[in-house]
Image (tube, helix red, strand yellow):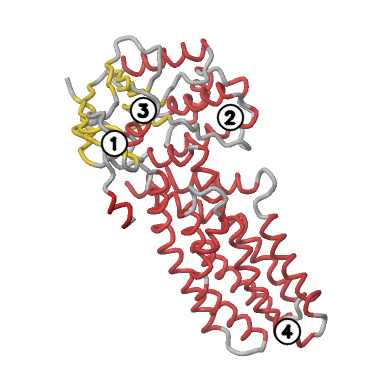
Amino acid sequence: MVNLLNVSKISASRGYRTLFRDLSFSASTGDILELRGENGSGKSTLLRILAGLTRAESGSLKYEIEGDVSSLKFPVHFLGHQDGIKAQESVEDQMIFWARFFQADKAEIRPALERVGLWKRRDVPGRGLSAGQRRRLSLARLLITYRPIWLLDEPLAALDVKGQEIVKELIAKHTSEGGVVVAAMHGHGFENAKVIEVKPFSKKIKTIPTNSLENA
Amino acid sequence: MQKQNMAEGVLLPLFFRELKLAWSGGGGAALPVGFYAGAATLTPLALGPATDLLQAAGPGVLFISLALASLLPMERLFQADLEDGTLDVLASSGASMTGIALSKTLAHWMASGLPLALVAPLLWVMLQGPGEAVLIVLGISLLGGLAFFFIGSIGAALTAGVRRGGLLIALVALPLYAPATIFGASALYAAAEGRDWTGSMALCGACALVAIALGPFASGAALKTALD
């Protein structure tokens, strides 16, 4: 069993508040990791650290990937709160851009859009999409090019029942092909998921050194 | 191989998309060009139609207006992508922030900096500049615009996370506009008075080159901080 992702002792804080400290976990092929925690507990921050967008305060993060994406420092797909959709550009044009950007085959666009149920609405500009459709479009971006690790921030948010089914199927397919999914979740989780609690190790509120405030 | 991938995979698609987005939905060039033409048109109304006065003030006014008009597209240069999450996806794909900043700034210069330079000769003639110098004016405006856009992109990246950061961009970028303004305007005056303009224009071009060489690195670093 190969660990695709090794996280050891990473910590993060926002201002003087520690989000989590010395968090360690690893993921091997086919794993679904579910990040759980209260609002503001640092699930999104952890995902952003995994995506290389935010720097961890301490600790190390290592991807061990084989194959043609191994040259990527962060071999991930990141699906955050904001869905990266341009209001003035049509669904299909946005997908064409991402396909070119990821150096993917344009032939992948149609199946990806059909998979998320947006192919019939491919001429609609981004501003014409509902919240759930925007989510579906950003999911389609994950399908046009292969990245072994998916980092999803509340992937079920805004989706209808059918949309949530699609997400679950996509995740099941991705993991069955050897990928890893790390998802921040509320409520209904995925089957066979490993749960990671994101919370500070000590609940004690860190006292703020007064002189550092004065110096700041 | 890696570099080629970079050009094919990041720089070119991003460049063309930015160009398209800048032109669609209201036309990215219309606002700065309108501002530029408006500011230059108001000059004779404010100074009076006397030829000698306009010839004395015209080149300077034209270059200041170019500097200010170049600031207008800066506010949305990175902010839109930061707000809607596009920058997250671009950055997490492993693309270099420097490359992202370079493609976006260059695309916006093509979308609005180039039209600004193209209307400059027209406004030059309107401000009683000698007609034989219009090509020189075009060249100086191209170089000056490049310097302004790439320096402005640093301010744009630094303030990308700030709501209504337009004023901040001006505060960050305008002091850095000084060298390009000095050499660009002096080249315009030299061209207007029939003196040798090549030295000043070369120095203005040097400002543009420095801006292009350093701007994307600085903006890329600033964008990383904005994402953090």
Label 4 sits on residue: B55
User: Disc 1 marks which amino acid?
Assistant: Thr
Label 2 sits on residue: A91
Q: Are marks 1 and 4 on the same chain?
A: no
Quick check: marks 3 and 1 in contact, CB under 8 Å?
Answer: no
Figure check: A121 above or below B32:
above
Cα–Cα gap, marks 1 and 4? 63 Å
Whole-percent x, y for residue B99 in the image: 41, 51
Q: Which residue bears the numbered disc 3?
A: A151
Q: Amino acid at mark 4?
A: Gln
Mark 3–mark 4 Cα distance, whole angstroms, equals: 61 Å
Sequence-wise, the earlier of marks 3 and 2 is 2
* Labelled pair 3, 2 in contact (Cβ < 8 Å): no
Indicate the chain on which mark 2 is placed: A
Image side of residue B87 versus residue A174, left or right: right
Expressed as whole percent of the image width and height from the top left, the position of residue A26 reads 21, 25
